[in-house]
Amino acid sequence: MKSKAITYYEVGTARSDRGSGWELVNDERLQADGGGISPVTAWPDGKYVLPRGPWRVPQYLEPPHFVFNRSLARGPRDFDMRDGFLLISSKMKTVLEELAPGDCDFRRCVTKFRNGEDAPELWIGSITKAYPEAVDLERSNVTVSRFGQYLFPSLQPPKVTFKPEIVRQSHVFRLVESWLMIFCDEQFRSRCKADNITGISFSKITH
């Protein structure tokens, strides 16, 4: 019997006119070259050579220090994205640890309000499960650039069919050829909805 098709979504941040409210105040001190939160070398073993890719969370020289500015947002949200990484609450971290065990990496941050009081717990996280050649290009409106990157349509909704033999076991993952994007299945989306995860959005990409 043919298995039921899985619905997939692109994961993003919910729109906010005021941003996340988090300000990183020690970005120049996190790495020896002042590279901020992203790894200095995106593909240390060669472009698209796994397992080390630009989604790796570096070993920082000191914990990332975020200050929450109440004038920029109503309050800390459970989910945000910055430079391909996640800024998440402990509640969101629990969801990822339960649905994607071993497929994520986390670094705890120092958090304060502008008045010096302690702010809610915050983690820099990353989805480290990344699949190469996981899109069925014949059944998707995705093209490949001359540099090997996936190009998604900008003037129409994306229609993406993943190769089930590659991604079926994952609830949340990346694509090597479009590593900044994060994708998930219905089970992950439903769990986030059930746990009232704030700041996250889902755009259906399978039809």
Image (cartoon, rainbow, N blue to C red):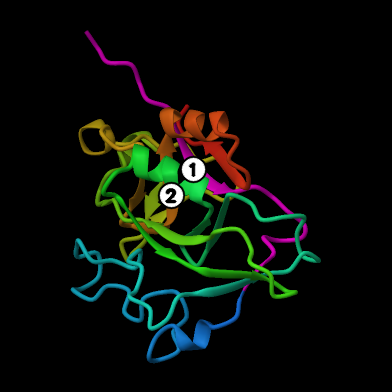
Nearest to the observer: residue 92 or residue 130: 92
Q: Secondary structure at mark 2?
A: strand
Q: Is residue 176 visible?
A: yes
At which x and y percent is residue 105? 34, 58
Residue 95: x %, y % from top left: 43, 40
Q: Dot 2: few (<14), some (14–19), or many (≥20) neighbours within 10 Å?
A: many
Residue lying at 27% horizontally and 38% vertically, measured from the top left: 167
User: Most prominent secondary structure in the magenta stretch?
Assistant: loop
Q: Position of residue 205 (x, y in %)?
A: 48, 36
Q: Which residue is mark 2?
A: 182
Please report the bounds of the magenta region as a residue range: 1-23
10 magenta-colored: yes
Number of other residues with Cα within 10 Å of mark 1, as a class: few under 14, some 14 to 19, many 20 or more: many
Residue located 53% across and 52% down the image: 89
What kind of element bears circle 1?
strand
Which residue, given by chain and number where applicable, does mark 1 sit on?
10
Mark 1 in CB contact with mark 2 (< 8 angstroms): yes
Horizontally, residue 35 falls left or right of residue 21, namely: left
Residue occupying image coordinates x 59% and y 72%: 66
**Is residue 51 a member of the stretch shown in magenta?**
no
